[in-house]
Amino acid sequence: MSWQWLRVPRRQGGKDVAALRRQIAALTEDVGELTRLARTDPLTGLANRRGWDEQLDRELAQAQRSGRPVSVALLDLDDFKRYNDAHGHQAGDRLLVAAAAAWEGQLRDGDVLCRWGGDEFAALLPGCSESEAREIIARVTPSTPSLQSCAAGLAVWDGTETCDELVWRADAELLRRKRATVQPWSDLQPRPDPSPERSTEGT
């Protein structure tokens, strides 16, 4: 971003004003691009953690006013470290890019997929009840490419919890599903999503 070339002309003739406007327009475009990059994961092109936090916060504020449901899902590739060790980190990066594209292709217009970190992704599903969200995740998980699989955890906003609390519940379900043998997503029936007891370690 070239702040040093933004010079206010001494004369205020038409040409000087036009030049100043062009400089301001170029500077505004630079700032917009930097803002976009700050919210984008460079590998997958999805929103990054910062972009996710902003969109989730905005969506919950809208849901608070409208009363419509909001669901959040976390997706985690199974045995990604083993895949990296067997095929190399470049192949691992290609798998992340392919998985991001495949999963995003199964989402609806208006849904948001982000790179949460490492091989973990988060999906924001506005206006989705639990049953609707589970139907979407039942489409997403089998689309994982390269004969790989993934686990998913889902939580539906209860109308009062914070963004962190909502994501925490989705993460708790993801961990339960990775640690236990569970039914395929397509066989699951909608059920209440109680908050698990929080750990009191360190308090």
Image (cartoon, rainbow, N blue to C red):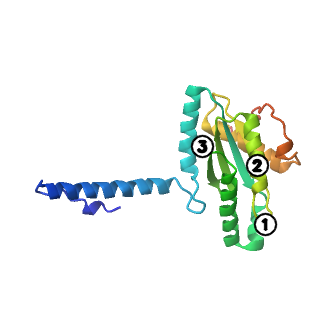
Camera sees residue 121: yes
- Under circle 2, the secondary element is helix
Q: CA distance from mark 2 to mark 3?
A: 17 Å
| Amino acid type indicated by mark 3 | Gly
For label 3, the crowd category at 10 Å Cα-Cα, with few meaning under 14, some 14 to 19 and many 20 or more, is: few
Please state if 34 lies on the left or on the right of 22 as rendered: right
Quadrant showing the N terminus: bottom left
* Position above or below: 195 against 87: above
Q: Residue at x 68, y 29 (%)?
A: 158
User: In the structure shown, which secondary structural element does the residue marked by tag 1 occupy?
Assistant: helix
Residue tagged 2: 139
Kind of residue at disc 1: Arg
Q: Position of residue 99 (x, y in %)?
A: 70, 59
Q: Marks 3/1: CA distance?
A: 34 Å
Q: Which residue is mark 1?
A: 82
In primary-sequence order, the first of circles 2 and 1 is: 1
The residue located at (48%, 57%) in the rendering is: 37
Q: Please state which amino acid type lies under the numbered disc 2.
A: Arg
Vertical comparison of 55 with 40: above or below: above
Q: Given this view, does label 3 or label 1 mark the residue nearer the observer?
A: 3
Residue contact at pointers 3 and 1, CB within 8 angstroms: no
Residue 203: mark: none
Element class at badge 3: loop
The residue labelled by disc 3 is: 110
Label 2 or label 1, whichever lies nearer to me, is 2
Q: Residues within 10 Å of mark 2 (few under 14, many from 20)?
A: some
Q: In the image, residue 192 lies at what x, y percent? A: 79, 30
Crowding near pointer 1: few (<14 within 10 Å), some, many (20+)? Answer: few
State which tag comes first along the sequence, 3 or 1.
Answer: 1
Q: Nearer the viewer, residue 28 or 89?
A: 28
Q: Is residue 202 visible?
A: no
